[in-house]
Image (cartoon, helix red, strand yellow):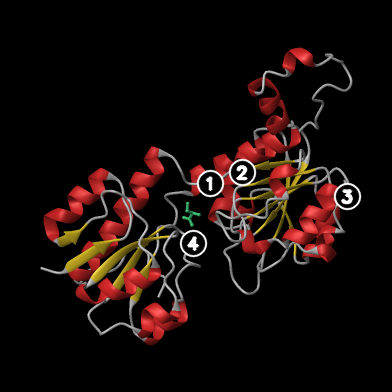
Amino acid sequence: MPKILVSRKISDLAEEKLKKEFDVTLNLKDQPIPESELIKIINKYDGMISTGFDKISENFFNNLNGKLKIIAQVGVGYDNIFIKAAEQKKIKVTNTPNVLNEAVAETTILLILAASRRVGEAYNLVRSDNWKNQKPDLTEFMIGNSVTGKTLGIIGMGRIGRIAAKSAKAFGMKIIYYNRNKLSDDLEDGAKYYSDLNSMLPECDFVSIHTPATPDTKHILNASTISLLNKNAVVINTSRGSTIDDDALIDALENKKIYAAGLDVFNNEPNLDNRYTKLDNCFVLPHIGSATHETRLAMSMMAVDNIYCFFNNKPLISEVI
Ligand code: DGY
């Protein structure tokens, strides 16, 4: 029976399913396994279920003895895994696309609303019991910007970007997008395509990033691209922190070169640049894009199914390499 390591707690039903077919080591207490420890134990296992919290570096792959055959990541992103080394060692890597599209799109809309309607400030005011000390004022008190009818620019019009666009249309938002390739009319669904990011940015009231973390998308929003946004623009990020140059975005927020940001992902999570947390015009979340019961169950199940398919010589559901 193949031996499977599950690096973190995954959904109960998925753990139960896995146990029926495999010799499984679960992490029921959900204790993070440091990379040095993972390297020590991994050679006992034929497969591993990983999460974005695990660092699976070149060093990890260099220390393998040939037993490990597959890493099934619970997550659509896999930038925590040094894919080149996995490829060289002929280790399969799978991820969990699609099942989290709606949850991440919901988080995108949440950030759009929260950042433009000053929800962080308003919430803190009530929670800190300071509301009663405010002078309610018709034109100043917690006045934000409307979302309805505004233009949303999407960077990366993949599956998640398209669902976010569809939801944004419920607010009468006009959708424009920048993507490597123009989509078919069907997938575009009325959105206007820009082949050049610099041409799209001045048109955006909101710009939302939906690209994977790759060398090409690193700092796609930087001092130069952010300078093309108008001063009412709001930056939204539910993809990966690496797509944004923190110094550039923080400078734009501090100096009111743009209106606000709504961010769920950061460089160096969970140790984000703490300047973000001090800005009234930045609404921050702790990477909860896919964090719903339904979605985490579906993600856990998909990782288990990938393991099942691999060891039963069936086509993998979602193969990265
Ligand atoms: C993913 O699946 O990559 C998400 O960011 C994890 O929540």
Q: Residue at x 62, y 39 (%)?
A: 109
- Residue 107's place in the image compared with 143, above or below, is below
Q: Secondary structure at mark 3?
A: loop
Amino acid on which the number 2 mark rests in the picture: Thr
The answer to whether marks 1 and 4 mark residues whose Cβ atoms lie closer than 8 Å is: no
The answer to whether marks 1 and 2 mark residues whose Cβ atoms lie closer than 8 Å is: yes
Along the line of sight, which residue is nearer the eye, 208 or 240?
240
- Residue 263's place in the image compared with 303, above or below, is above
Amino acid on which the number 1 mark rests in the picture: Val
Question: In the image, is 103 to the left or to the right of 127?
Answer: left
Q: Which residue is mark 2?
A: 108
Separation (CA) of disc 3 from disc 2: 22 Å
**Rendered location of residue 113, percent (x, y):** 68, 34
Q: Is residue 216 visible?
A: yes
Separation (CA) of disc 2 from disc 4: 16 Å
Q: Residue at x 47, y 67 (%)?
A: 80
Q: Is residue 319 visible?
A: no
Amino acid on which the number 3 mark rests in the picture: Lys
Q: How many marks?
A: 4
Q: Which residue is mark 3?
A: 257
Question: In the image, is 49 to the left or to the right of 256?
Answer: left
- Residue 78's place in the image compared with 110, above or below, is below
Callout 3 environment at 10 Å: few (<14), some (14 to 19), or many (20+)?
some
Q: Secondary structure at mark 4?
A: loop
Amino acid on which the number 4 mark rests in the picture: Gly
Question: In the image, is 312 to the left or to the right of 40?
Answer: left
Which is closer to the viewer, label 1 or label 3?
A: 3
Q: Earlier in the sequence, mark 2 or mark 4?
A: 4
Determine the residue located farthest toward the left in the rendered image: 1
**Rendered location of residue 318, percent (x, y):** 37, 64
Q: Which residue is mark 1?
A: 104
Along the line of sight, which residue is nearer the eye, 42 or 226?
42
